[in-house]
Every structure is written in C-alpha cells, then in structure tokens.
Amino acid sequence: MSCACTTCHVIIREGFNSLAPSDELEDDMLDKARGLEPTSRLSCRALIGDQDLVVEIPKYTINLARENH
C-alpha cells in the first residue's frame, strides 16, 4: 500500500463502482502507468467492497518480472 511504483496497475472490468474512490496520490501515480483506462486502479490501494470484481492485468507494465521465464 505504498503507492510508489505502479507495478500493480490493473483494469477493473466488472465491479468498478463498488471500490472505494481513489485518492489524489493514486490518481497521480496512475498517470505514470502504461495502458491507462478509465477503470484503471492500483491494486495496492483499491479497497474492495462486497461485490465480486473482474480484474485484468495489463499486458505491459513497468514491472521487470516476467511469467514463463
């Protein structure tokens, strides 16, 4: 929950309105994320309510880790 790097950028495909609103710090950090969409959030900062979510992990991030390496 440090909101320092945007490597946890996700796109909420369903249930976006059930999340607590983002704050100014999160919004500023999201501006640095690649592939930003209107329903983008930082998963480290998003407070989940009682509704199920469908979350997409973007293909490109600034994270240096890779799957299947």
Image: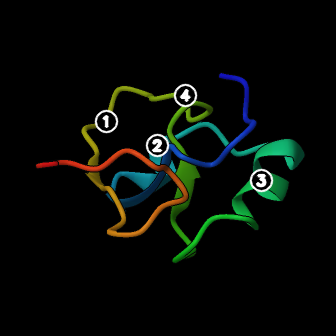
First reached walking from the N terminus: tag 2 or tag 1: 2
- Distance, label 3 to label 2, CA atoms, is 21 Å
What amino acid is labelled 1 in the image? Gln
Q: Which mark is residue 51?
A: 1
Mark 2 falls on what kind of element? helix
The image quarter in which residue 65 lies = top left
Q: Position of residue 63 (x, y in %)?
A: 49, 50
Mark 4 falls on what kind of element? loop
What amino acid is labelled 2 in the image? Ser
Do the residues bearing badges 2 and 4 touch, measured as CB atoms within 8 Å? no
Q: Is 30 rendered above or below residue 68?
A: below
- Distance, label 2 to label 4, CA atoms, is 9 Å
Q: Which mark is residue 29?
A: 3
**What residue did someone put label 2 on?**
18
- Distance, label 1 to label 4, CA atoms, is 11 Å
**What residue did someone put label 4 on?**
47
Q: Position of residue 22 (x, y in %)?
A: 71, 45
